[in-house]
Image (cartoon, rainbow, N blue to C red):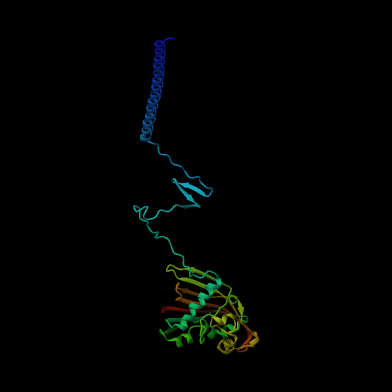
């Protein structure tokens, strides 16, 4: 090959290589351009998606076994969720004026009611309020086993059937008069009853909110003043029958033939919640029996029924 031909061959080879390189560069540029376009499209799509409205979704927390849905508000352990004043100031809370507060100081057991009863009554002597005592003892019926005795004891029967009421006013602060005239007369207390002394105790509330407490006493025959009846009452005793009732009837009787049956006896006090007596009364029903009593020239059994009522009223503390 000549020198000229060799030069021509080299020149052609150089052109061919340059052309190939140019195509490769062009292809790379094209690929890069396409990639840029695709990237732009992707970015634009993401922007549009971010601007699109998103539907609101509410995720409900799983309901436990002790939850109940009420008005779309979860209630746990049957207690609705509370809203503080800062969260809801549009609806003021209105107190329930019909609710009645519990009186935690009120007695709960029978023993506590009896203690409350005793404590309040004893203040009638220790605190000295003003009051009025009204006492009445009536023989409601007299029966004689010997008909001939009816005319003999007619005068006595008239006396026994008297309905006279003895009224004793006690001035405020006169504790000596209170001790002497509020039963048990002459004692420092009004009641020292224990649960073993009584038959029952009941209590209610009156329209003024005061407690009305009633003590029912057990039936007893010829009770002694040192027993349960003597812890709250002044009552007829066998000694008084021997010294007063029998002589008034013109009768003589052996002491062993005298019996006094006490039944349906009670004490009722109306007491304010702060422990002040508003009213108080006692009731004694007594069946007096004299066996083989001698009246004038006859011998007869005497069966008399007596009612003793004492009321303490107009109490001013």
Task: Quarter of the image for the C terminus: give it.
Answer: bottom left
Provide residue 280's location: percent of width, then percent of height.
47, 77
Q: Nearer the viewer, residue 55 or 3?
A: 3
Q: Is residue 240 visible?
A: yes
Q: Is residue 267 visible?
A: no
Is residue 271 depicted above or below 22 in this figure? Answer: below
Q: Nearer the viewer, residue 174 or 247?
A: 174
Is residue 98 found left or right of 228 in the rendered image?
left
Name the residue: 45% across, 86% down. 175
Is residue 215 found left or right of 131 in the rendered image?
right
Provide residue 51's location: percent of width, then percent of height.
35, 35
Provide residue 159's location: percent of width, then percent of height.
51, 84
Provide residue 140's location: percent of width, then percent of height.
53, 78
Q: Residue furthest left?
A: 90
**Displayed quadrant of residue 222:** bottom right
**Displayed quadrant of residue 24:** top left
Task: Quarter of the image for the N terminus: give it.
Answer: top left
Q: Residue furthest front?
A: 3
Is residue 84 depicted above or below 69 in this figure? Answer: below
């Amino acid at each position: 090959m000549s020198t000229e031909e060799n030069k021509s061959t080299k020149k052609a080879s150089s052109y061919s290589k340059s052309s190939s390189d140019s195509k490769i560069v062009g292809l790379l540029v094209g690929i890069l351009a396409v990639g840029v376009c695709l990237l732009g499209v992707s970015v634009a799509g993401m922007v549009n998606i971010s601007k699109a409205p998103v539907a609101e979704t509410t995720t409900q927390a799983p309901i436990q076994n002790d939850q109940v849905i009420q008005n779309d508000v979860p209630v746990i352990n049957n207690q609705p969720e509370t809203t503080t004043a800062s969260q809801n100031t549009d609806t003021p809370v209105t107190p329930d004026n019909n609710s009645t507060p519990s009186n935690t100081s009120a007695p709960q057991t029978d023993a506590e009611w009896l203690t409350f009863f005793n404590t309040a009554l004893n203040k009638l002597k220790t605190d000295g309020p003003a009051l009025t005592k009204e006492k009445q003892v009536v023989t409601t019926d007299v029966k004689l086993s010997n008909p001939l005795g009816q005319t003999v004891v007619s005068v006595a029967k008239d006396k026994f059937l008297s309905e006279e009421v003895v009224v004793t006013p006690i001035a405020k602060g006169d504790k000596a008069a209170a001790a002497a005239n509020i039963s048990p007369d002459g004692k420092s207390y009004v009641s020292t009853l224990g649960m073993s002394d009584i038959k029952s105790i009941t209590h209610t509330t009156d329209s003024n909110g005061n407690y009305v407490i009633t003590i029912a006493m057990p039936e007893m025959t010829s009770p002694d003043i040192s027993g349960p009846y003597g812890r709250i009452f002044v009552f007829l005793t066998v000694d008084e029958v021997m010294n007063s009732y029998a002589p008034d009837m013109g009768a003589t009787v052996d002491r062993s033939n005298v019996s006094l049956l006490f039944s349906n006896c009670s004490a009722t006090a109306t007491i304010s919640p702060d422990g002040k007596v508003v009213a108080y009364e006692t009731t004694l029903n007594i069946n007096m029996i004299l066996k083989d009593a001698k009246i004038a020239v006859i011998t007869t059994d005497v069966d008399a029924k007596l009612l003793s009522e004492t009321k303490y009223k107009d109490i001013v503390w």
